Image (spheres, rainbow, N blue to C red):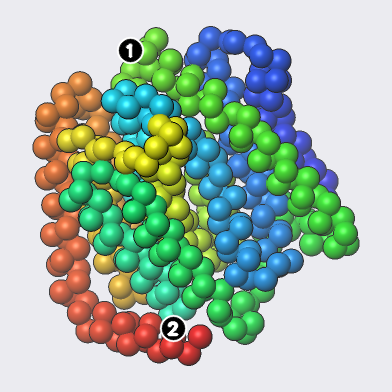
């Protein structure tokens, strides 16, 4: 328990400065505020992840997935919903672009960086060059394919509206319904890792108290820090002459995604790469459905009317690229084996995205064209991968159909 309390103390200390600054109505320089609230969100994310990881075994699986999946990405939701709300209040402002930037950055970071890190670490740890998924993961793969496919509808419309909210939330609820129908035999208990493992040594009553305290405090910090973090990022970009769009697209998701990615790293180091990759796929479904779906809802509330978030030329290509990357990543999982070579390809293409973004940061037209070419490259590679694995796809579709029919 000493290690657990030490980790909680460190994470709590990271949040404390942000709480003091916000409640004390202090106004430090934007750069300092960005750092303070970045670490506040980061610390809160870790507290949430440890508490929720331990809580999963105390509630029914369907309820656990519904509640825990939503709370786990609360830092990302809080920041993106804030930008979307402000975009609704100020139509045509830079907030419109920021809402889409934060969402696309978070999605691409998960697939382009987190997935390759898992297979690279597994190779380093065990010398094995692939991570093999179970047939049970076909459900996740199927729903991620469905949500990724729907993303192209949004690209064609050049907007995200409340109809998208309804459809995407429906996809997510059906996904929860299907995964929640798994039998108890499928819910194989796994030994906890990291700080959460210490909680299993306590009585259930003490575990409830600690888990509740961690969750409530973390949620409090996240809600307290989201607005000043989002605004300080914008101000920092302006003061330093940095591209505010890129700052919001890549720095903000780092704070919210870090705890999830680090848990996946710990699972991989503990020789559980399948669990790590499965968790990343679930997070991707969550963000590709709920997170995207919440954007027009927050936008409409901010504007006080039924509205939609428009996608300009840059946002459209960012969204197109995110959807294309998602489809290509899925094509790499069709054989239920994520190999080292596949991971390196994803990482290489992700690095190209970053290079394009930063090299042409002041040239909007060239950036848009480059993103378009890269998106089509992803789609061509996806088609090649599908053709090569067409027999496996047929078998997987039949297997998935039988699995869903038997639930």
The residue beneath circle 2 is 404
Residue appearing at x 26%, y 62% in the figure: 149
> Where is residue 370, by image quadrant?
top left
Q: Which residue lies furthest to the front in this view?
A: 305
- Measured from the top left, where is residue 298 in percent x and y? 45, 39
**Which residue occupies the foreground of this view, 26 or 121?**
26
The residue beneath circle 1 is 241
**Which residue occupies the foreground of this view, 199 or 296?**
296
Q: How crowded is mark 1: few (under 14 residues within 10 Å), some or many (20 or more)?
A: few
- Measured from the top left, where is residue 220 in percent x and y? 68, 36
Look at the picture and state if 353 lies above or below 388.
above
Residue appearing at x 24%, y 38% in the figure: 311
Alpha carbons under labels 2 and 1: distance apart:
53 Å
Q: Is residue 13 left or right of residue 388?
A: right
Say which of marks 2 and 1 sits in front.
2
- Measured from the top left, where is residue 158 in percent x and y? 21, 44
**Which residue occupies the foreground of this view, 187 or 348?**
187
Q: How crowded is mark 2: few (under 14 residues within 10 Å), some or many (20 or more)?
A: few
Residue 355, visible in the rendered structure:
no
Residue 308, visible in the rendered structure:
yes
Q: In this view, does 400 lie to the left or right of 225?
A: left
Q: In this view, does 38 lie to the left or right of 166?
A: right
Residue appearing at x 59%, y 10% in the figure: 27
- Measured from the top left, where is residue 253 in percent x and y? 45, 38
């Amino acid at each position: 328990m000493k290690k657990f309390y030490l980790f909680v103390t460190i994470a709590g200390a990271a949040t404390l400065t942000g709480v003091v600054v916000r409640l004390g109505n202090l106004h430090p320089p934007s750069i300092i505020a960005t750092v303070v609230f970045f670490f506040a969100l980061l610390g809160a994310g870790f507290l949430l992840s440890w508490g929720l990881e331990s809580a999963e075994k105390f509630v029914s699986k369907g309820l656990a997935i519904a509640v825990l999946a939503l709370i786990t990405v609360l830092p990302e939701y809080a920041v993106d919903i804030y930008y979307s709300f402000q975009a609704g209040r100020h139509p045509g402002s830079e907030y419109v672009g920021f809402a889409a930037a934060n969402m696309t950055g978070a999605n691409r970071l998960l697939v382009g960086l987190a997935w390759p890190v898992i297979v690279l670490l597994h190779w380093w740890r065990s010398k094995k060059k692939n991570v093999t998924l179970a047939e049970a993961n076909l459900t996740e793969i199927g729903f991620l394919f469905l949500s990724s496919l729907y993303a192209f509808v949004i690209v064609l419309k050049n907007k995200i509206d409340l109809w998208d909210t309804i459809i995407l939330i429906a996809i997510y609820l059906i996904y929860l319904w299907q995964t929640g129908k798994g039998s108890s035999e499928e819910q194989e208990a796994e030994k906890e890792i990291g700080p959460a493992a210490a909680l299993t040594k306590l009585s259930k009553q003490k575990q409830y108290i600690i888990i509740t305290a961690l969750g409530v405090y973390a949620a409090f910090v996240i809600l307290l820090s989201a607005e000043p973090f989002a605004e300080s990022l914008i101000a920092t970009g302006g003061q330093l002459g940095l591209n505010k769009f890129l700052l919001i697209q890549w720095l903000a998701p780092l704070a919210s995604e870090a705890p999830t990615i680090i848990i996946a790293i710990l699972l991989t180091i503990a020789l559980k790469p399948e669990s790590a990759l499965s968790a990343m796929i679930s997070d991707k479904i969550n963000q590709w459905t709920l997170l995207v779906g919440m954007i027009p809802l927050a936008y409409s509330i901010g504007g006080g009317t039924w509205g939609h978030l428009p996608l300009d030329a840059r946002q459209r290509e960012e969204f197109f690229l995110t959807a294309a990357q998602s489809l290509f990543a899925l094509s790499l999982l069709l054989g239920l084996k994520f190999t080292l070579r596949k991971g390196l390809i994803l990482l290489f293409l992700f690095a190209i995205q970053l290079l394009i973004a930063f090299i042409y940061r002041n040239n909007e037209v060239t950036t848009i064209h480059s993103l378009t070419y890269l998106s089509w490259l992803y789609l061509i590679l996806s088609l090649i991968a599908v053709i090569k694995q067409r027999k496996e796809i047929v078998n997987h579709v039949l297997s998935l159909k039988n699995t869903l029919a038997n639930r």
